[in-house]
Image (cartoon, grey):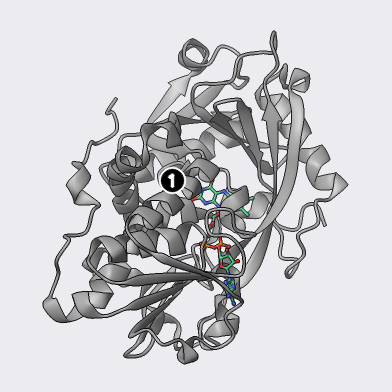
Amino acid sequence: MASVNPIPPSAFAVPAVSSPNSARESVAVIGGGVVGLTVARAAALAGHPVRLLDRGVPGRPDGASWVAGGMLAPFSEGWPGEDELLALGAASLNRWSALAAELGEHVVTARGTLTVAFDSADVADLTTIAEWVGARGHAVEMLSRSALRALEPGVGGRAALSCPAELSVDNRAVLAALAESCKALGVQVTTTDVVDPAALPEDRVVVAAGWASSALLPGVSVRPVKGEILRLRRRAGSVPTPAHTVRATVNGRAVYLVPRADGLVVGATQYEHGDDTAVTVAGVRDLLADAERVLPGIADYEFAEAAAGLRPGSPDNLPIVGAVDDRTIVATGHGRNGMLLAPVTADAVVAELRGEPLPEAACCAPTRLSGGSGPSSVSRPSDLSRTGALS
Ligand SMILES: Cc1cc2nc3c(=O)[nH]c(=O)nc-3n(C[C@H](O)[C@H](O)[C@H](O)COP(=O)(O)OP(=O)(O)OC[C@H]3O[C@@H](n4cnc5c(N)ncnc54)[C@H](O)[C@@H]3O)c2cc1C
């Protein structure tokens, strides 16, 4: 099996000097979540004077980035028909190796994802993913029960899809490291609730305000997609935390267990409930029950936190990244993949500032949605499994 494809640190860092004109342009980035912070950092590395504006404290925002699971999982999430998302996710995962090296390897909490199967329907779905993703040149493999046990003795299931190149990161450590890096690069920070991006004095404006971006750019269609998630702390004598990120479908619901230094993150529900961020009893109950099926013994862990966040959902599941006018660039709509897609998004925005759009991000152009396309018709098991199931 292939290991993570190492990329030299210079591959993510945008060249310090681009064209003399664009390097002189000042940039305001609205939103201090993972997308805004990564964009601000990359723009500063490219030589732009940058100001980051957020309602709260960048690096500890009240946004989706603070609650996220941190899986960088384009292959486990692959599904026939989603070629553009797979290619975009793979391009961003490649950049993550370099970004993690720059932020500090402590941000990486797991290498490799195992999606376990409990029944023949699961095996059929995972085989579909393995064949489709494998045919596109990515390292994926179906594992037998004994091979799964050898890797993760404490995990249930009769087979598994292995995606060895995927990573998982501690989202909060990533945010802290990005904020620190921005500070070191001279990014200015303003705490404010931006109402009108056009009123900002900078030469260029990047709107990276997550699901709230459409309030700032009414032509951009993003909606909040609620997700609940738990944090569990391992106690002395508890079953060991898996070394891999472990995913499964239990009772028709997707569940994942993402390792952290002190335990596990268990996620996540998915509903369309407007901007509601209440954590429900049903959400917590089902996540715990499903996680226990995956890792029997987890009940001995300490219940540390339950939280909910709002993913910025786009109409076709692809992010919305690119120029919306001569001055303004949008970077939102990353749905459940914003941690994964932040590095390629940052490169795309900096390329846009140079006036040379990034070919890898062509599928994210805001213009593709200007025809008023409706919600995506593409569906897959993990989309359907929790949406509406807990309402
Ligand atoms: C439960 C859950 C689990 C997830 N797990 C994963 C995962 O495992 N892997 C993955 O890749 N992705 C995951 N995601 C998705 C990921 O978290 C999001 O796609 C990503 O965080 C979006 O980042 P963002 O910076 O666009 O938005 P946010 O993190 O929401 O940040 C937006 C920021 O904009 C600020 N803002 C908004 N409006 C204004 C304004 N008018 N003025 C000033 N500031 C403003 C907010 O304060 C906020 O700080 C998960 C999401 C959820 C909810």
For label 1, the residue is 177
Q: Quadrant of residue 15?
A: bottom left
Residue sitting nearer the eye, 163 or 298 = 298
Left or right of residue 303: residue 257: left
Q: Name the image quarter holding the N terminus.
A: top left
Residue 86, visible in the rendered structure: no
Instruction: Check disc 1 and give the amino acid type.
Output: Ala
Q: Quadrant of residue 37?
A: bottom left
State whether residue 180 is above or below residue 36: above
State whether residue 375 is above or below residue 153: below
Residue at the limit of the structure toward the top, as seen here: 237
Residue 128, visible in the rendered structure: yes
Residue sitting nearer the eye, 106 or 179 = 179
Circle 1 — which element?
Answer: helix
Q: Residues within 10 Å of mark 1 (few under 14, many from 20)?
A: some
Left or right of residue 55: residue 29: left
Residue sitting nearer the eye, 291 or 196 = 196
